[in-house]
Amino acid sequence: MTHTAPLRHALWLAFFAMASAAANGDAVLTPGQPQSAAPSLSLGTTGQGSLAMRVAERLPSVVQIRVRRSEGVAAVAAANTAPGLPVPDGTGSGFVFDAQGHLLTNAHVVRRARQILVIAPNGQEVEAKVVGSDDTTDIAVLKTAAPLAPPVPLGSSKELRPGDPVFAVGSPFGLAHSVSAGIVSASGRFLPSNPHVAFLQTDAAINPGNSGGPLFDAEGRLVGINSMSFSRSGGYTNIGFAIPVEEARRVAAILIRDGQVKRGWLGAELQATETAARALGRQRGVLVTRVHADTPAEKAGLQAGDLVIGIAGRPLADGGDLHRFLAAAAPGDRLELELWRQQQSRSVRVVLGEKREVPRPATNLAAYDPARSLGLVLQELPGKGGLRILAVQGIAEQNGLDPGDEIDSLDGQPVKDIHDLNLALGRIPNREMGLLGIRRQGRALVLPLGPRPQVGTTSTTAPGQPRSTTDD
């Protein structure tokens, strides 16, 4: 430990001392009864308003979750998360949500689980069942035969300000019931990987295994569910994201009642990108990259290349605004969209349908092939041949490629599918670049691609958040 460690500790304690005065107690609330009071956390280590006291009060309601999936898949690579592929056994976190024994966690923690074991802080281990799971918001509800502990009290994420203190409880790297503390870094954060949620951002340590655990305010009230972190190394980088408690409570109530969330469906693939909006002469918007046949979007006259710039009579607030609106809509809802097409504004009315499975062309999402090593997530174009870029990161992003670009050729040779592209990439000598022929919003472009990473090296940009296209 360096000589600066005591100073950092003193500054940390002083920060909480300045946050506000000591609390006067903490009532236990049931879901739907959030408290409203300014967060307070005292400097003392044993007082009623201390961080240690708040942790002691909340720890019994937080659980470790161990998931067993298909037999023999524990060694399967973590990248294999596409639908229909095996997922490794894992560990996550959760917490008691109500007096009936329901627990909340992340949907990705319990996805395709064969058995779910819940471990309380006292070592009690019980089996839990999935009541309902919602991949769109990454929220799942579990149920144990009997309540394990009192439910956590609910707070309000809307009252939080950047700089307000928060603390997280979870099982990072399997270390059960670990506590980390920090501040709210931002609220309403839009992430391309899940544009349906306006996340809370915190610098409290959020690591693998924290997923599904609670984020508390200084009063020990639930303000979010820890869902993901941004990292280029796989470890803590001061950037974690939590699903706001309001969204968690809304989705949980539906899952407990119906077992699933039925949303209004547009039937189009959407890409939230400022790059495309600026190219079309607008500051912000959501690009329609594909309209599925016989869907509400097609019936309303939406076209690939349209830019959605407004919804329900108002302009879009940010790239995730439309996705969040759709995530809260129901089948049969009527929706007015303002579009930007051929340098003109026009309005269309859509009656949302119920989401149905659309045949999915082949992708390289779960592979690690030459294209993925360059940061390209690809989808084959049915019928006409060629590839559509679903997401970019690393070298591909540096080369100027964007989600929604369609690949026609590499070094002048036609590319019909993912196999063709990978063969062509394999013919490019190391440290050299190829010329990729693409179509972007109807225009033909040629961009460099490469050089490929050397075997045995690690990309410095591989983890993190690629820009991507979503289906709504």
Image (tube, rainbow, N blue to C red):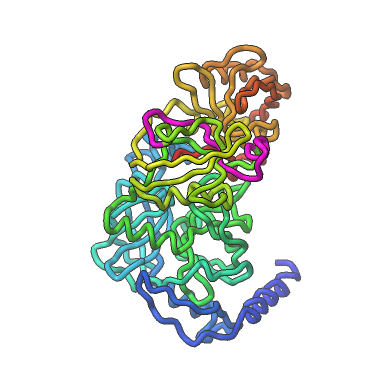
Whether residue 81 is in magenta: the answer is: no
Residue 397 at x, y percent in the picture: 66, 35
Which residues are the magenta region? 276-296
Q: Is residue 211 visible?
A: yes
Q: Nearer the viewer, residue 382 or 310?
A: 310
Residue 93 at x, y percent in the picture: 42, 59
Position of 14 relative to 292 (above/below): below
Residue at 43 percent across and 26 percent down: it is 361
Count of marks placed on residues: 0
Quadrant location, the N terminus: bottom right
Horizontally, is 455 left or right of 132 in the view? right
Quadrant location, the C terminus: top left
Horizontally, is 303 left or right of 96 in the view? right
Position of 131 relative to 166 (above/below): above
Asked which quadrant contains residue 161, the reply is bottom right
Asked which quadrant contains residue 264, the reply is top left
Residue 250 at x, y percent in the picture: 38, 60
Position of 207 relative to 101 (above/below): above
Whether residue 293 is in magenta: the answer is: yes
Q: Nearer the viewer, residue 209 or 243?
A: 243
Residue 395 at x, y percent in the picture: 67, 33
